[in-house]
């Protein structure tokens, strides 16, 4: 597509097209962020390169390459579902959570203080612990074992659950809606071994859950007596009770106030490169698959051509010799058509001397079958014939 044609294509973008591009760009953006934080990001990059090569082949008119790529796409769809089954399931879960979001009951400041004091005391006594604060994502699919509790949070309760002599000592405590919802739960273990260097199973479980859901996981090391925090697939060491309290409060505020102005401003200023890439890719998709297939019309100057003329006749004049013809079809086909191949072909096999008026129709118009005639200006032309010796095909 030349710069002129590209500018013409962009000028005809309507309001519905803008919304269409933004919606597709938003979907691509969230998919990009999701795959970016998972181990499947490298595979997603390979698929993106594969799709980009297909677009280049299609736009360049490489029909054999395009045909081969289309055959691979049918197989690739199955492969994508298999490779990204966990990511796709999580995406659909988040969509369901967003559509069914209801008012939550987060921890109150007094309960946050109880949680911080408990973690500090457990760390001082080097008692291992794993506490999960539920976010917006459902956790049931990622958690195994344990017992339902649904109890009001208190410092004695948490200390008893992590008592070394308790069966629940090695499991995780799940806090949801401001209450201790479950204890002795088993979490999925992370396989990010580079991040887990020097850490134990509890840290692997906390990191594993944070990779699959938006929960905040707090870990007390039994060997070192330190407190670590796992969120969004990252481990962070907490050095003071104040930093723990600040982190928990920020997490609860973000999950309970998803539409606050601060979070909205952060949305617009974060991941600018990813947003720009997603919108650009959505625009390329629109130019490739939508804009080129929109109905359009274009006017061509088409010459008149005669065939079947007897050798005893000759064409003395044609008025007009070139006709302005309006053709309709898909915009991409109109842009790619070679106007020099268009002809108005008239059979003069039975013509006689004199002036003959010929009306233009699709029967005498040589155009691609995917295009149709809208109208001709003028709708006819006059050809003057006379007898002569010799004669053959003549164009005007």
Image: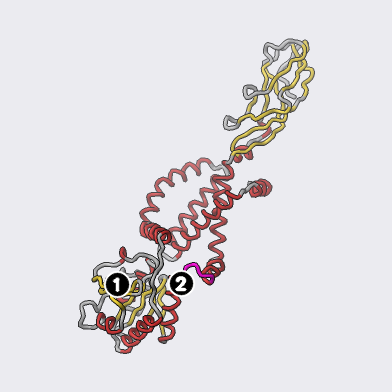
Snapshot quadrant of residue 189: bottom left
Compared with 136, 375 (above or below) is: above
Q: Main secondary structure of the magenta part?
A: loop
Instruction: Choose the circle earlier in sequence order: 1 or 2.
Output: 1
Snapshot quadrant of residue 121: bottom left
Q: How is the image coloured?
A: secondary structure
Category of crowding for the residue at label 1, using alpha-carbon neighbours closer than 10 angstroms: few (below 14), some (14–19), many (at least 20): some
Q: Position of residue 87 (x, y in %)?
A: 39, 60
The residue positioned 70% from the left and 33% from the top of the image is 300
Q: Is residue 204 visible?
A: no
Q: Position of residue 163 (x, y in %)?
A: 24, 83
Per the image, is 283 magenta? no
Tag 2, which secondary structure?
helix
The residue positioned 59% from the left and 45% from the top of the image is 291
The residue positioned 61% from the left and 48% from the top of the image is 14
Residue 181 numbered mark, or none: 1
Horizontal relation, residue 316 to residue 223: left or right: right
Closer to us: 372 or 40: 372
Horizontal relation, residue 271 to residue 111: left or right: right
Tag 1, which secondary structure?
strand
Which quarter of the rendered picture does the C terminus lie within?
Answer: top right
Q: Is residue 55 visible?
A: yes
Snapshot quadrant of residue 315: top right
Residue 354 numbered mark, or none: none
Residue 254 numbered mark, or none: 2
The residue positioned 53% from the left and 48% from the top of the image is 55
Q: Position of residue 348 (x, y in %)?
A: 69, 15
Compared with 174, 237 (above or below) is: below
Magenta region: which residues? 257-261
């Amino acid at each position: 597509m030349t710069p002129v044609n590209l500018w013409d294509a962009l000028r005809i973008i309507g309001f519905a097209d803008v919304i269409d591009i933004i919606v597709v760009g938003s979907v691509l953006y969230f998919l990009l962020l999701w795959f970016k934080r998972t181990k499947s990001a490298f595979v997603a990059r390979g698929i993106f390169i594969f799709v980009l090569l297909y677009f280049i082949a299609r736009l360049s008119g490489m029909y054999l390459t395009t045909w081969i790529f289309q055959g691979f796409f049918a197989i690739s769809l199955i492969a994508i579902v298999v490779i990204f089954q966990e990511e796709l399931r999580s995406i659909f879960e988040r969509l369901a959570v967003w559509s069914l979001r209801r008012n939550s009951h987060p921890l109150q400041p007094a309960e946050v203080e109880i949680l911080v004091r408990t973690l500090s005391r457990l760390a001082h006594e080097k008692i291992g612990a794993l506490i999960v604060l539920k976010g917006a994502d459902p956790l049931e699919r990622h958690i195994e074992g344990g017992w339902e509790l649904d109890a009001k949070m208190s410092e004695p309760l948490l200390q008893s659950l992590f008592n070394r002599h308790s069966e629940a000592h090695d499991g995780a405590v799940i806090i949801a809606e401001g209450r201790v919802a479950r204890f002795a739960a088993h979490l999925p273990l992370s396989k990010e071994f580079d991040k887990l260097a020097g850490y134990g199973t509890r840290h692997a479980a906390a990191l594993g859950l944070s990779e699959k859901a938006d929960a905040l996981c707090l870990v007390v090391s039994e060997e070192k007596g330190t407190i670590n925090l796992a969120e969004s697939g990252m481990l962070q060491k907490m050095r003071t009770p104040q930093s723990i309290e600040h982190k928990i409060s920020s997490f609860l505020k973000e999950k309970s106030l998803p539409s606050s102005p601060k979070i909205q401003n952060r949305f617009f200023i974060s991941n600018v490169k990813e947003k720009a890439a997603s919108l650009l890719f959505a625009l390329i998709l629109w130019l490739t698959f939508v804009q080129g297939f929109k109905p359009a019309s274009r006017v061509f100057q088409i010459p008149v051509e005669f065939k079947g003329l007897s050798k005893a006749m000759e064409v003395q004049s044609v008025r007009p010799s070139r006709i302005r013809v309006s053709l309709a079809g898909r915009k991409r086909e109109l842009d790619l058509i070679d106007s020099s191949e268009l002809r108005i072909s008239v059979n003069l096999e039975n013509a006689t001397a004199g002036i003959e008026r010929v009306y233009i129709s699709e029967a005498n118009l040589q155009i691609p079958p995917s295009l149709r005639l809208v109208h001709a200006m003028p709708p006819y032309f006059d050809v003057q014939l006379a007898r002569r010796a010799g004669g053959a095909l003549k164009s005007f």
